[in-house]
Image: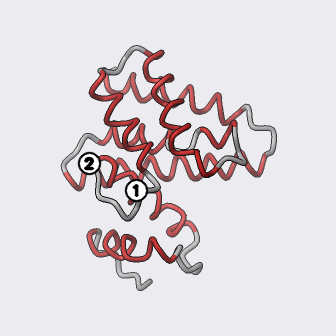
Amino acid sequence: MSYNICKVEAIRKTINDMLNAVDDDNRRNTFYIHLYGVANFAALLALRRGFDEKLAYIAGLSHDISLLEFPDDYENHCKKSSQMTKEILTNIKLFTENEIDIITNAVLHHNDIDIIHSPYDEILKDADIFQPFINDIPKPPFLPAKPRLGKIISELNIPLKI
């Protein structure tokens, strides 16, 4: 097993444990779909854009984890999820400081869709916008996300109109 796969499996186990602790089946399933959907799409975008898909995947998998513990604190979830992710990655002891910084910064900035940050931040923002859209195509996208969503659809040459 490669070193990177061990990293992914370690974070996946931790996130799955957090998801399994959610009592409400519907809420747990919604988070499974969203977190894994964003993670997979982030990995795809990273490959497409020439970046490390494992780092993008891990950022996607952990980007909303604070909402599992603090469901009513959406306003602070980026900061809290970033802090929780840093603690998890540090405790796993498989990640370099640079990898931890890349992942936690992406998590921290994932809702700042009007500001351009690092490539990994942008990958996570795009994945987080695309996942709910692709899960429910007939529903119109969140208006501020529409320009970014249009760029993603164009980048991937997907024949959709938004």
Going from N to C along the chain, the mark reached first, 2 or 1, is 2
Rendered image quadrant of residue 157: bottom left
The one of 42 and 109 positioned closer to us in this rendering: 109
Q: Which of the labelled discs sits on residue 125, or is there none?
A: 1
**Mark number displayed over residue 118:** 2
* Residue 112 image position (x, y, % from top left): 42, 57
| Residue 101 place in picture, x, y as percent | 33, 31
Q: Residues within 10 Å of mark 1 (few under 14, many from 20)?
A: many
Horizontal and vertical percent position of residue 41: 40, 54
Q: Secondary structure at mark 1?
A: helix
* Residue displayed at 54% across by 47% down: 35
Q: Amino acid at mark 2?
A: Ser
Q: Residue at x 61, y 32 (%)?
A: 16
- Residue at mark 2 to residue at mark 1: CA–CA distance: 11 Å
Most extreme residue toward the left is 50
- Tell me if residue 104 comes above or below residue 7 in the rendering: below
